[in-house]
Amino acid sequence: MNTVFKNIIVLLTFLVLTISIQANELKPIFTSSVGMFILNVNENASGISTTDTTVTAQGDVLASTSISALSLQFNYEFKTFSNKSYFVKLVTPLVTDGGQGVFLGALGFNYFFGSIGSLLNIKGDNFDLTLMPTYRFYIGASVGPGYLLYNTDSKKKGDVFLNIGVHVGYSYNFSDKWSLMIEGGAGKGSGSLTSSIGFGGVLGASYFL
């Protein structure tokens, strides 16, 4: 009878904590992944200038290009609740297309369906309970600055832009600390010289800190 009573107390404690869990009670997560990113870039008319309004200098025409690059992505989920988390992200080219590439940093959030956001450890006087999500299915959004290198017919150019993105992902836990993840997303970039629309997908591994 005592064992049944203790199990009921543990279950009720878990339910209460899951409903009213506070930031940082779940473990932070570090993810490293590799994926392909495709960015369609169009120059803005406002970014083209010439001293003679009747003549367009050679090379000073609006450029349109597509950038595809194998990229490396690092993601740190630093504040995790029962059904959402916040993260910072860094994306850097691993293999570029003709010297073209995109560097990106972002701050965003994930919202989870059907599972808690991370590993949860509940300790009491007479028990120590660890809960690990078998899977994590999530959607999210992010915003952050980026730097773009692209080629035109006449020269290589660069532009700083602001990117707003959305994504959907799934991870499956295969050990006490590790899980495999797959994620896909899209983003809209706005810079002083260019506007862009990007798509990508990554495959990686997550570690519960």
Image (cartoon, rainbow, N blue to C red):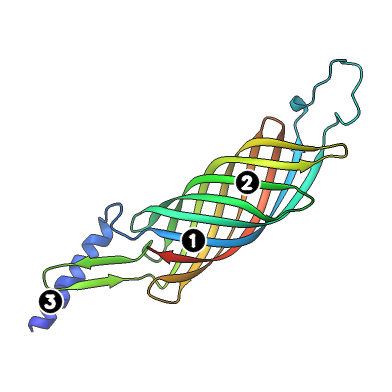
The three-letter code of the residue at mark 2 reads Phe
Q: Which residue is mark 2?
A: 103
Quarter occupied by the C terminus: bottom left
Mark 3 and mark 2 in contact? Answer it, CB < 8 Å: no
State whether residue 187 is above or below residue 202: above
**Residue 12 appears left or right of 37:** left
* Other-residue count near label 2 (Cα within 10 Å), few / some / many at <14 / 14–19 / ≥20: some
Q: Nearer the viewer, residue 111 or 85?
A: 85
Residue placed furthest toward the bottom: 1
Viewer-nearest of labels 3 and 2? Answer: 2
Viewer-nearest of labels 3 and 1? Answer: 1
**Residue 61 appears left or right of 34:** right
Which circle's residue, 3 or 1, is located before the other in the chain? 3
**Residue 143 appears left or right of 99:** left
State whether residue 149 is above or below residue 71: above
Q: Which mark is residue 31?
A: 1
Q: Position of residue 133 (x, y in %)?
A: 38, 70
Residue placed furthest toward the left: 2
The three-letter code of the residue at mark 1 reads Thr
